[in-house]
Image: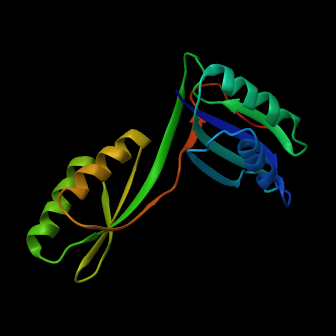
Amino acid sequence: MRHIVSILLENQTGALSRVVGLFSQRGYNIETITAAPTEDPSITRITITLFGDGRTIEKITKQLHKLINVIKVSILNEDNTDGAVEREILFVKLQAVNQDVREEIKFICDIFGAEIVDITPVLVTVQFVNTSQEVDRFQKAIAEHSEVIETVRSGVCGIARGDHSLHV
């Protein structure tokens, strides 16, 4: 099962590498990882997605709490009534050598709610923001109509719904 782990961490040199090192030492594969300062610049929020059963996630949570710079850990998709909001950004650069291909790209973007953010005489760059599953669907659909030159995905950013929050 896919899980989203959110971690508040002191923004110190080496703190992020210790978190990542914990995962690699234990043989857990990180699917995606994002990190950025919070409203307090001395604190970084890391969001990690990974696959594993409940027992694995419980072990990871306990091990993360033992790390010196970790402030709080939360599993955003735990079995709770509120759940979580998640989004991922995709940038995809596409070959668009003629008007028919450009129109097809525009049509697919309109269906999915994607945005064309850059155009050159032979390339179109598209931005799409949605859940990881929708990003996968869009990526597959657009690749059927144009040659993909380059793809960049941000990784998941997530936040708990409702009253649940991860703050100091």
Indicate the position of residue 120 as horizontal and vertical percent values.
28, 81
For residue 98, which quarter of the picture? bottom left
Horizontal side of 60 relative to 81 (left or right) equals right
Is 8 situated above or below 129?
A: above
Is 160 situated above or below 140?
A: above
Q: Farthest residue to the left: give it.
A: 100
For residue 127, which quarter of the picture? bottom left
Is 89 situated above or below 51?
A: below
Indicate the position of residue 80 as horizontal and vertical percent values.
59, 17
Query: Going 72% across and 42% down the picture, which residue do you hit?
Result: 23
Tell me the quadrant of the picture where the C terminus can be found: top right
Indicate the position of residue 99 as horizontal and vertical percent values.
10, 74
Query: Going 56% across and 28% down the picture, which residue do you hit?
Result: 161
For residue 91, which quarter of the picture? bottom left
Query: Going 38% across and 39% down the picture, which residue do you hit?
Result: 133
| Residue 109 seen by the camera | no
